Image (cartoon, rainbow, N blue to C red):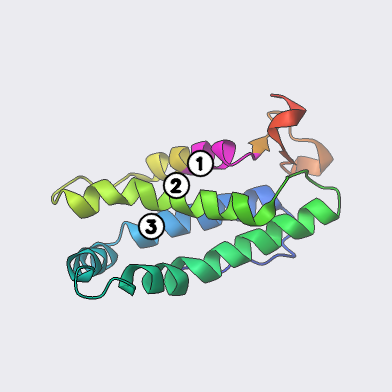
Amino acid sequence: MLPNIDPDEPDPGSALRQIGISVLETLNNPVTIATLRLIIGALGRFPRLGEEFLRNSLGPTVEGIAASLGVHAASKEMRIGNSHAAAEEFARRCLAHVMERVLVPHQPFLTEAEYTAVVEDSLRKCGIRWRDAVPHGGRADLMSPSDGEA
């Protein structure tokens, strides 16, 4: 089961980092990897199985991330063009980092530092930027690529 995100979390930066790391940890789990291998193997006989798996596993997480992004965009804490598209892209990037391990057994597991780097990179590539200076009482702010680099 993938974790949920609270759309009312007051610190969206911290929440998105935590959810990203949790998604990577869940997808990087040996049981999840074995399940993904079984699903891939069964796709020839059950072509909708992959879609069902993604909808039921990543789907609720994507919806939670999108809701959180939407809440913070609506309150002007951040600017983002399409919250749902950014959430989907973020989840896909996290899944992509696990696919090598799914397809090639005995790959080393990611370290905590690598999880963090993957999450930061994925968030940036989804149109979410972190300001280097942390205003507002120590809270990280989100900004879109159109805001430029801090």
Mark 1: amino acid: Ser
**Magenta residue check for 49:** no
What residue is at 68 percent from the left and 53 percent from the top? Answer: 83
Given residues 42 and 114, the one toward you in this image is 42
Q: How crowded is mark 1: few (under 14 residues within 10 Å), some or many (20 or more)?
A: many
Q: Are marks 2 and 1 in contact (CB under 8 Å)?
A: yes
Q: Where is residue 56 in the image (x, y as percent from the top left)?
A: 45, 75
Image quarter (top left, top right, bottom left or bottom right) of the C terminus: top right
What residue is at 37 percent from the left and 48 percent from the top? Answer: 96
Disc 2: which residue: 93
Q: Quadrant of residue 72?
A: bottom right
**Horizontal side of residue 104 vs 77, given as left or right:** left
Q: Where is residue 80 in the image (x, y as percent from the top left)?
A: 73, 45
Q: Earlier in the sequence, mark 2 or mark 1?
A: 2
Q: SS of the residue at dot 2?
A: helix
Number of the front mark, 1 or 3: 1
Q: SS of the residue at dot 1?
A: helix
**Secondary structure character of the magenta stretch overall:** helix
Q: How crowded is mark 2: few (under 14 residues within 10 Å), some or many (20 or more)?
A: many
**Horizontal side of residue 79 vs 99, given as left or right:** right
Given residues 111 and 16, the one toward you in this image is 16
- Residue 138: image tag: none
Q: Residues within 10 Å of mark 3 (few under 14, many from 20)?
A: many
Disc 1: which residue: 122
Disc 3: which residue: 25
Per the rendered image, the range of residues in magenta is 119-128
Q: Position of residue 29 (x, y in %)?
A: 29, 61
Q: Where is residue 64 in the image (x, y as percent from the top left)?
A: 62, 66
